[in-house]
Image (cartoon, helix red, strand yellow):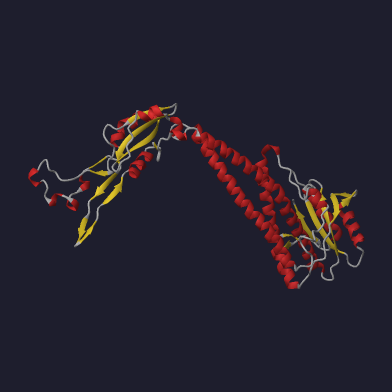
């Protein structure tokens, strides 16, 4: 989207009629002999001046407010463009294109009362735009979350056994052929393995997590006379003197496969009991150690996919497709709502931005030309590639100093008149 570039210029009337100043500004840069742009009158209302100190402080703040409001306008514009895609977004201000609004600008006295103190007026405008920014953040976050959920649902529905909803991948006949344990001490886990890992997984499965479970205990086979003696139990026995895998021997079962992966079940020890012990005269109770999480971690480190928390439920078949359709509808509705929101609030933010520009012109003109307020402001629509020529022409007509110096406050080139750039 191509936007025209504008320059706002203001000169002191120096006691002459405003129309005379207007013709001077026109002859300087927007006439047949100086065709550097198209010029429009700019209505600057009579605002409350206050004190010189308050104006100087406000001048410093206005530059920051201007940049902040512009950034929010750009955010709304960018969001609208991203939502519209290749179709492009037709953003308007009060029902007209932004360029027409700028060129036909009229102060909104109802929304921004000109007799309010300038600082209050600027705070009012900035506060309204900040609310737009906050609402955009919330709506964009909601839309992003819904998009992420939709992508996840698509991945699960169209994926292989590592991600697809297993209720859709398995049927009742398959499940009847499986023995699935979920007791106090045993748990059957569903594990998806890439076909390239299949051989290695089947070879290593009973050795995986070989340091997780402690199988040490009383050796009654070599010392049957000690059977039942208290010295052979509890904390006096090195439970971890012998370690091994939690996988139950012979429990590996291939369930099904697709083009990319194979689904297995494997039964493992669910937990391990660590015996209690005495600390002085106080008994510290024994604890159960979770083995499922530790074994699942080992599987993930080997890049095997644990289908955690899966419980077969035939009633859930087809629900993934329904959930996908529901999410698609939610995303489409949220997208449409956000698109409408951007179109509405772009205009609101843009109006605020234009009013901030006009306030800047007023403040800079009063600081430069003094009181009583007597200046004429115009808006130049810069011809393509002729901004430098336009500025030079204004300098030649209204400048008293040859050469340029840095304006410390605005970090722009110094001119003997008020000049503010505007790139909507």
Of 162 and 288, which appears nearest the observer? 288
Most distant residue in the left direction: 225
Give the image quarter of residue 325: top right
| Residue 172 in the image: above or below residue 149 | above
Most distant residue in the front direction: 315
- The structure residue drawn at horizontal position 51% and vertical position 39%, both measured from the top left corner, is 152
Q: Is residue 217 left or right of residue 115?
A: left
Image position, residue 217 (x, y; %) = 18, 45
The answer to whether residue 149 of the structure is visible from this angle is: yes
Q: Is residue 380 left or right of residue 348?
A: right
Of 46 and 56, which appears nearest the observer? 46
| Residue 37 in the image: above or below residue 309 | below
Q: Is residue 264 left or right of residue 20?
A: left
- The structure residue drawn at horizontal position 31% and vertical position 44%, both measured from the top left corner, is 291
Of 310 and 244, which appears nearest the observer? 310
Image position, residue 368 (x, y; %) = 80, 67
The answer to whether residue 409 of the structure is visible from this angle is: no
Give the image quarter of residue 248: top left
- The structure residue drawn at horizontal position 72% and vertical position 63%, both measured from the top left corner, is 122
Q: Is the N terminus in the top left, top right, bottom left or bottom right quadrant?
A: top right
| Residue 395 in the image: above or below residue 291 | below
Image position, residue 421 (x, y; %) = 76, 55
Q: How many marks?
A: 0
Image position, residue 147 (x, y; %) = 57, 42
- The structure residue drawn at horizontal position 30% and vertical position 38%, both measured from the top left corner, is 268
Give the image quarter of residue 214: top left
């Amino acid at each position: 989207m191509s936007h025209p570039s504008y320059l706002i210029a203001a000169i002191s009337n120096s006691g002459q009629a405003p129309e005379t100043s207007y013709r001077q500004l026109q002859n300087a840069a927007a006439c047949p002999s100086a065709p550097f742009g198209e010029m429009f009158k700019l209505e600057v209302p009579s605002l409350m001046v206050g004190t010189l100190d308050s104006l100087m402080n406000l001048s410093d703040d206005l530059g920051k407010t201007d940049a902040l409001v512009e950034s929010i306008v750009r955010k709304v514009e960018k969001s609208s463009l991203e939502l519209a895609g290749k179709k492009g977004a037709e953003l308007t201000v009060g029902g007209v294109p932004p360029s027409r609004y700028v060129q036909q600008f009229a102060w909104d006295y109802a929304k921004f009362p000109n007799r309010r103190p300038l600082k209050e007026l600027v705070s009012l405008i900035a506060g309204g735009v900040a609310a737009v920014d906050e609402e955009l953040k919330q709506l964009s976050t909601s839309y992003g979350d819904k998009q992420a959920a939709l992508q996840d649902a698509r991945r699960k529905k169209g994926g292989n056994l590592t991600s697809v909803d297993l209720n859709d991948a398995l049927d009742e006949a398959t499940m009847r052929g499986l023995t699935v344990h979920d007791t106090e001490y045993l748990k059957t886990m569903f594990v998806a393995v890439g076909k390239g890992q299949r051989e290695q997984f089947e070879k290593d499965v009973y050795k995986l997590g070989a340091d997780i479970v402690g199988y040490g205990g009383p050796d009654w086979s070599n010392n049957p006379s000690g059977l039942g003696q208290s010295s052979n139990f509890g904390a006096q026995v090195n439970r971890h003197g012998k370690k091994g895998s939690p996988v139950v021997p012979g429990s590996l079962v291939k369930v099904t496969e697709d083009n990319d992966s194979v689904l297995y079940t494997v039964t493992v020890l669910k937990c391990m009991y660590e015996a209690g012990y005495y600390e002085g005269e106080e008994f510290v109770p024994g604890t159960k150690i979770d083995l499922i999480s530790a074994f699942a971690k080992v599987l993930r480190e080997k890049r095997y996919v644990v289908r955690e928390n899966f419980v077969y439920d035939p009633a859930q078949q087809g629900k993934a497709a329904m959930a996908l359709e529901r999410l698609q509808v939610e995303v489409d509705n949220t997208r449409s709502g956000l698109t409408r929101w951007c179109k509405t609030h772009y205009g609101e933010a843009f109006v605020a931005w234009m009013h901030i520009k006009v306030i800047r012109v007023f403040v800079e003109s009063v600081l430069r030309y003094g009181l009583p307020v007597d200046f004429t402001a115009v808006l130049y629509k810069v011809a393509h590639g002729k901004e430098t020529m336009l500025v030079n022409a204004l300098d030649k007509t209204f400048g008293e100093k040859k050469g340029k110096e840095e304006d410390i406050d605005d970090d722009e080139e110094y001119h003997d008149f008020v000049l503010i750039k505007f790139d909507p």
